[in-house]
């Protein structure tokens, strides 16, 4: 594959890849299969724990798959509940440490995941535990030149109670960043999760972009007719997660806002959620989303000869 000069792309468009396996394929093999489609970055993700994954070996395999493509690993992610004390939760917290310590092998600049939650408690009641767990992790990351970013997914929780993640509400973000005020602690943001809560993502983006370190490329379609007839708690679903290019968000304006505020990093598509472009159409949808987001970005970087 001919190397692509991506060094001037301040906002790359990529996708998420399961770090253990993707539909029975290793992460490296999956990356080698989809790399020719034009993805510019990959976010490697773990669910709840790293298990017996040899991170040094994984990094070597992924680097060989990327070759001289110029494509980068934007972030390493682990999604679980690092604030709780069950064995699997402790594995999640330990996973954050391991990813921080091995990020340099991948060339990743951010460690991403859920902020966790004290199960069954309100968001304010989870803040002391959040501070206890993430204050040392933030320092550990900063010492290695890394940032921590929390996904804004509610995982079915609300202000009063939940099982997974407190980082889904602007009021919660204020409490979190007051408790752990380190400059390298921020958000992994996407419009979809806000739209599920019927929040307009653009005003929120304008306020919070300085704290956004990584973006998930995931959109949503809201069926307002269903809301008007059945509300948001009825039998009929009122919102669907979508691949970018098939949902309601104005990604041209989203990327413009990111540029206005100096964001540099990746928008990595979070696939495997679209109700239409799934199964045999999964990669059709993802590649459409990839090309759509590149178009919303303004295309590929072209040097200005007058500068």
Image (cartoon, rainbow, N blue to C red):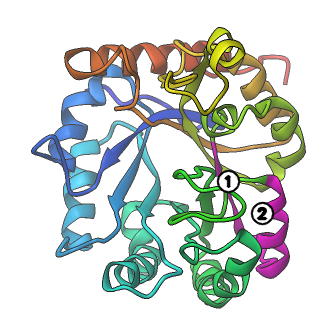
Residue at the spot x=66%, y=56% of the render? 158
Q: Which residues are magenta?
A: 170-189
Check the image and report above or below for 139 versus 184. Answer: below
Residue at the spot x=25%, y=53% of the render? 62
Q: Residues within 10 Å of mark 2 (few under 14, many from 20)?
A: some
160 or 258: nearer the viewer: 160
**Residue 166 visible in rendering:** yes
Q: Is residue 40 left or right of residue 284?
A: right
Image disc number at residue 168: 1
Residue at the spot x=59%, y=52% of the render? 154
Q: Tag count in the figure?
A: 2
**Quadrant including the C terminus:** top right
What secondary structure is found at the residue carrying circle 2? helix
x%, y% of residue 142? 65, 79
Q: Is residue 24 left or right of residue 213?
A: left
Q: Residues within 10 Å of mark 1 (few under 14, many from 20)?
A: many
Which image quadrant for residue 262? top right
Residue at the spot x=58%, y=83% of the render? 137
Image disc number at residue 172: 2
Which image quadrant for residue 12? top right
Q: Is residue 10 left or right of residue 156?
A: right
Is 250 included in the stretch rendered in magenta? no
x%, y% of residue 273? 39, 31
229 or 46: nearer the viewer: 229
**Residue 302 visible in rendering:** no
Check the image and report above or below for 290 versus 9. Answer: above
What secondary structure is found at the residue carrying circle 1? loop
């Amino acid at each position: 594959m001919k190397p692509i000069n991506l060094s001037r792309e301040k906002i790359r468009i990529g996708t998420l890849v399961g770090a253990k396996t993707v539909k029975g394929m290793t992460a490296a093999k999956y990356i080698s299969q989809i790399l020719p489609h034009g993805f510019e970055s990959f976010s490697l993700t773990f669910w709840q724990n790293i298990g017996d994954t040899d991170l040094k070996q994984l990094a070597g395999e992924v680097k060989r798959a990327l070759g001289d493509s110029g494509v980068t690993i934007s972030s390493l992610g682990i999604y679980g509940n690092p604030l709780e004390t069950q064995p699997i939760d402790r594995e999640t917290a330990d996973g954050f440490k391991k990813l921080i310590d091995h990020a340099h092998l991948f060339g990743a600049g951010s460690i991403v995941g859920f902020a966790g939650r004290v199960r069954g408690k309100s968001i304010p009641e989870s803040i002391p535990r959040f501070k206890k767990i993430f204050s040392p992790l933030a320092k550990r990351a900063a010492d290695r030149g890394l940032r921590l970013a929390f996904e804004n997914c509610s995982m079915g929780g609300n202000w009063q109670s939940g099982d997974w993640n407190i980082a889904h509400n602007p009021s919660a973000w204020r409490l979190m960043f007051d408790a752990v005020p380190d400059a390298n602690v921020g958000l992994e943001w996407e419009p979809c999760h806000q739209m599920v809560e019927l929040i307009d993502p653009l005003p929120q983006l304008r306020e919070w972009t300085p704290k956004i370190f990584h973006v998930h490329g995931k959109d949503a379609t809201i069926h307002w007719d269903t809301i008007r007839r059945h509300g948001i708690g009825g039998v009929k679903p009122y919102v669907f997660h979508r691949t970018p290019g098939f949902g309601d968000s104005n990604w041209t304006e989203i990327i413009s806002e990111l540029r206005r505020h100096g964001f540099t990093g990746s928008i990595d598509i979070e696939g495997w959620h679209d109700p239409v472009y799934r199964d045999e159409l999964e990669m059709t949808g993802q590649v459409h989303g990839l090309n759509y987001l590149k178009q919303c970005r303004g295309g590929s970087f072209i040097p200005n000869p007058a500068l």
